[in-house]
Image (cartoon, rainbow, N blue to C red):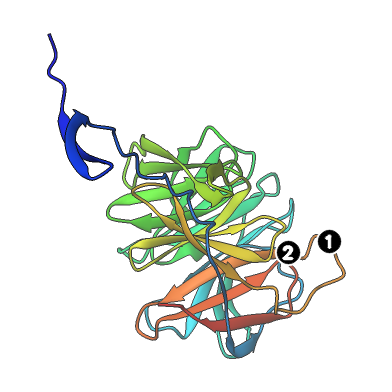
Amino acid sequence: MSKMSLCFVAEGSRMVLRPCTERRHPVRPLANTPTVKLRIVKQYPHDPTAFTQGLALTPNGKTYYESTGLYGRSTVREVDLLTGRVLRSRPLPTNHFGEGITLLPSGGLVQLTWREQVAHVYGTNFTTGSVAQFTWPREGWGITYTANKLIISDGSSTLYFVQAIAPYKTQSMLIVRERVNGQLRPVVRLNELEMVGGDLYANIWQERRIAVIDITTGIVKRWLDLSLLPVNSNPDAVLNGIAYHPASNRLFVTGKLWSWMYEVEVPV
């Protein structure tokens, strides 16, 4: 037999014992994911013929690695930040469509391909060709590196955490979600990726915003609004490049067929 809790309640001028009434605290709905507008600090020339698929800034912040796409035109290249001049470049096989790229602690690079299910691994001198390849059994979109893992996107709401050495096995997956009207909804079309501090930044294909993602929960902590950047009339010329320089705490963004690279402040 269960025990009943009794509480003193007021009845007229008397306090009497009666069965306690449970007090339920109202459940507060989840607040919508906040949006932060970014401020442009500086802009740099960018090759307007580059179908940019991925960026990675070098540690000295003076050059960046870029992966460009399209069949027969895909490359991996190193570019001077101040001038936009291509310092060295290597074409991919004509049947490979270049996608995201990331810099490894060793100084090497990993570059995805779109539908070819191949990822290229380069040494410090990528112009001599890839030193290894591994199979990626999905579409390749964006890629970044953190804590001995590669994080890869495939255009869905799922992120894949892959060991950064052979045999490059997928170790875990994470669904990215945002807060909308009291609910958690998946965020699709995750594209170019970049680690910024302990957060993962992801641009959304065909949108002018970047998701700041908690990589332990997959929840979007905030949106970075890039709607202030100039609009290109070409529908293919979309935002698609994120690079971060820790020493200056600056973010560098560009897009496919854009004439400029933009340096923006990273919000605290």
Q: What residue is pinned by disc 1?
A: 235
* Residue 9 versus residue 81 in the image, above or below: above
Crowding at dot 2, Cα within 10 Å, few <14 / some 14-19 / many 20+, comes out as many
Q: Which residue is drawn at the image coordinates 34% and 39% (left, top)?
A: 24
242 shown above or below 138 = below
In x, y percent, where is residue 48?
75, 75
Q: Is residue 112 left or right of residue 13?
A: right
Quadrant where the image shows the C terminus: bottom left
Element type at mark 2: loop
Residue 100 versus residue 178: which sits nearer the camera?
178
Near mark 1 (Cα within 10 A), the count class, few <14, some 14-19 or many ≥20, is few
Q: Going by the image, does 135 lie left or right of 172?
A: right
User: Which amino acid lies under the numbered mark 1 shown in the image of this protein?
Assistant: Pro
Amino acid on which disc 2 is placed: Val
Q: Is residue 70 left or right of residue 59?
A: right
**x, y percentage for residue 7?**
17, 35
Which numbered marker is on residue 84?
none
Q: Which residue is mark 2?
A: 238
Label 1 – label 2 distance at C-alpha? 7 Å
Which percent across, then down, holds residue 28?
A: 44, 49
Front residue of 211/255: it is 211
Q: Are marks 1 and 2 in contact (CB under 8 Å)?
A: yes
Please say if 118 is above or below 146.
Answer: above
Label 1 SS:
loop
Examine the rendered structure and indicate whether residue 57 appears above or below residue 178: below
Q: Depth check: 163 or 225 in front?
A: 225
Residue in view at x 28 percent, y 52 percent: 148
Q: Position of residue 162 (x, y in %)?
A: 37, 42
